[in-house]
Image (tube, helix red, strand yellow):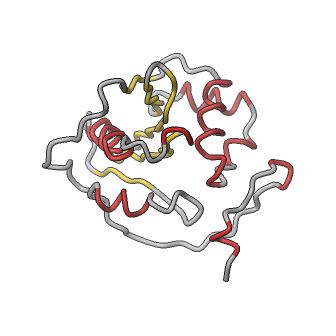
Amino acid sequence: MEQPPATPAPALPADAHVAVATKCTVPFYRYLYNTVGQDYVWWLRRTASDAEIANVMADPSVSIHVLYRDGAPAGFYELERRAGGQTNIAYFGLLPHAVGCGMGAAFLRHAIDQGWSGHTRLLTVNTCTADHPRALPNYRAAGFIETRRVREVWPVPARLGLKVPERLLAG
């Protein structure tokens, strides 16, 4: 995305808000990452040590933003600010109980607006076929354009016990 959206941002429900996790603990981060990513084969950070996760969170170019609804976590996103004015939405998702509750578009827009704060000149997000089936359509609807496709074969460790979605096994 090469410029911020020109349309007004949709509102989160009145009982929802987003907070920057300035003192995010490793266990809380793992809870968010593992719970959001469980059905979508999010595995890379599962294999990272606590020290590696702590280093990511201590990096001043990384920020963790948590969606709360009725005081309970409902989603999170992670922004990475890179050299040259590029910001990447490294992770974005809702906890399973929040999927389908009508908050996704507003939460994604929050991530986009936060991504454009500061000196951002390019905002990026990555998705894959293992992500929620609505991920790519939602990113497109929010204004992202597809710039490339890469075929990857992931060496997901079996010890993680992650189930590959059926739609990826067919064909």
Residue 10 lies, with reference to residue 137, above or below; the image says: above
Which of the two residues, 22 or 82, is positioned nearer the viewer here?
22
Residue drawn at the location 45% of the way across and 58% of the way down: 135
The image quarter containing residue 118 is: top left
Q: State which quadrant residue 50 falls in.
A: top right
Tell me what residue is drawn at x 74 percent, y 57 percent: 163
Residue 69 left/right relative to 114? right
Q: Toward the viewer: 35 or 111?
A: 35
Q: Which residue is painted at 14% across and 48% down in the image? A: 7
The answer to whether residue 32 is left or right of residue 91 is right
Farthest residue toward the top? 23
Query: Total marks drawn?
Result: 0
Locate the C terminus by quadrant.
Answer: bottom right
> Residue 130, percent across and down?
59, 62
Q: Residue 85 placed where, x, y %?
A: 31, 45
Quadrant assignment for the N terminus:
bottom left
Which residue lies at the image location 40% right of the left edge and 23% below the top edge? 19
Q: Position of residue 153 (x, y in %)?
A: 69, 69
In the displayed structure, would residue 66 be above or below residue 164? above
The residue positioned farthest toward the right in the image shown: 159
Residue 148 rendering spot, x and y as whole percentages: 43, 71
